[in-house]
Amino acid sequence: MKKIALKIKRKENTSDLPLPKYMSIGSSGMDLYADIKKEVSIEPREVKLISAGIYIDIPLGYEAQIRPRSGLALKHGISVLNTPGTIDSDYRGLIQIILINVGKEPFLIKRGDRIAQMVIKEVVQAEIEEVSELEDTFRGEGGFGHTGV
């Protein structure tokens, strides 16, 4: 398994929160923890921005993707609104997660709750070449259900 160095700086007054960590040897995502002063309720269909309490230094050629936690999604309808959220290698601001409640009940977040996961991925940048025609393929312009059910 390939490993890279990921520098993390804590936000002030977050020493009580764990740093992001993998929960098993085969995990691809590190859990992120809620950096909130008091409990936050997310009502059904409501969106909230929740701090993870960290800043990160991602090496050039990589990004961090912020994804929902499957248990929160299944049990409570809690997701990351812009999933996957992208954190570029040159961003040095506070990591915050846009959570949405698509469930039927309010969801309560407490300080230190695991609210999302962060996956580090390699990035490929495209070199744009404008052309007057694209190569034909068997599929062509078929999209959105063109192959049937």
Image (cartoon, helix red, strand yellow):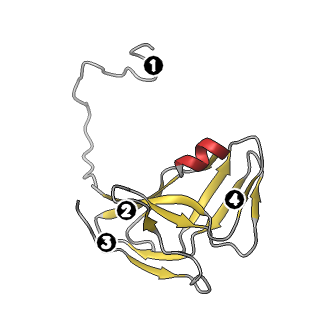
Marks 2/4: CA–CA distance: 23 Å
Could you tell me residue 86's position as x and y percent?
46, 58
**Residue corresponding to mark 3:** 59
For badge 1, the amino acid type reads: Gly
Looking at numbered disc 2 in the image, what kind of residue is underneath it? Glu
Disc 1 on helix, strand or loop? Answer: loop
The mark that comes first in sequence, 2 or 1, is: 2
Q: CA distance from mark 3 to mark 2?
A: 8 Å
Question: Could you give the CA–CA distance between mark 2 and mark 1, rounded to whole angstroms?
Answer: 31 Å
Residue at (27, 70) in percent of width and height: 4
- What type is the residue that disc 4 sits on? Lys
Q: Is residue 15 visible?
A: yes
- Which label number is shown at residue 64? none
The circle drawn on residue 48 is 4
Earlier in the chain: of badge 4 and badge 1, it is: 4
Is residue 93 at least partly visible in the picture? no
Name the residue at the front extreme: 24
